[in-house]
Amino acid sequence: MEALKIKKLFTLEQTIAAQLFQEAEFPWEILPKIREFIVKLGNTLPEEEYEKRGENIWVAKSAKVAESAYLNGPLIIGKNAEIRHCAFIRGSAIVGEGAVVGNSTELKNVILFNGVQVPHYNYVGDSILGYKSHMGAGSITSNVKSDKSLVVIHGVETPIETGLKKMGAILGDHVEVGCNSVLNPGTVIGSNTNVYPLSMVRGFVPADSIYKKQGETVKKRA
């Protein structure tokens, strides 16, 4: 359980949403609160650094946003972030400073910490991506179980009931997800872990590991 706590997964100095995380113990607890938090925070952002574009959309003046990108609020796009051609942000999203949201990538109810990259054909929904985590081309989060039951986190001593119907993946700081991987509902990946391409990931993956396939995870060498 300790490895799943916010303090073990993230560097809170690397997100504008630090206050929201400080109000919880486990990261999935804040997923239902993202929308309300963005509206509250957005109205406090300095006008000299952020411009308001439509209802509840705040974009840093230093960010680069392609004309073809779709932005829906509530949304905060941080300083020096890059929103590329045909990105689709459906709302309830925080895009951290220096983050990249790429071609045909879709975001919904997410927090991307600073330096996160989801640059090519990614779907990220009801998820949190830690500082400088990266999702390879075509990798996605699956956020609803096929039977529509509530999400349970496996791979720990005792399965954890989240009480959520929608939960994608939680990636700690510096996680690398290989191309065309699927992160199933309730996936939690510890910091500094690599996931092989074409992986199907389910449950908890420890920090400082290499995930090769289901049932085969090895510790990184020092």
Image: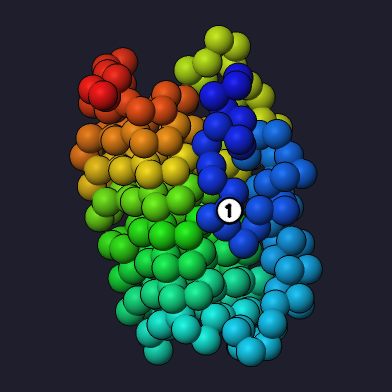
* SS for callout 1: helix
Residue 64 relative to residue 181: left or right: right
Which residue: 60% across, 43% down?
Answer: 166
Residue 198 relative to residue 160: left or right: left
Q: Residue type at mark 1: give it.
A: Glu
The residue tagged 1 is: 13
Quadrant in the rendering for residue 51: bottom right
Which residue: 42% across, 68% down?
Answer: 98
The answer to whether residue 194 is above or below residue 125 is: above
The answer to whether residue 38 is above or below residue 207 is: below
Residue 106 relative to residue 56: left or right: left
Which residue: 55% across, 32% down?
Answer: 8
Looking at the image, which is closer to me, 117 or 103? 117
Is residue 3 in view from this perspective? yes
Looking at the image, which is closer to me, 173 or 161? 173
Which residue: 56% across, 81% down?
Answer: 59
Looking at the image, which is closer to me, 198 or 26? 26
Quadrant in the rendering for residue 73: bottom right
Quadrant in the rendering for residue 17: bottom right
Q: Residues within 10 Å of mark 1 (few under 14, many from 20)?
A: few
Which image quadrant: the N terminus? top right
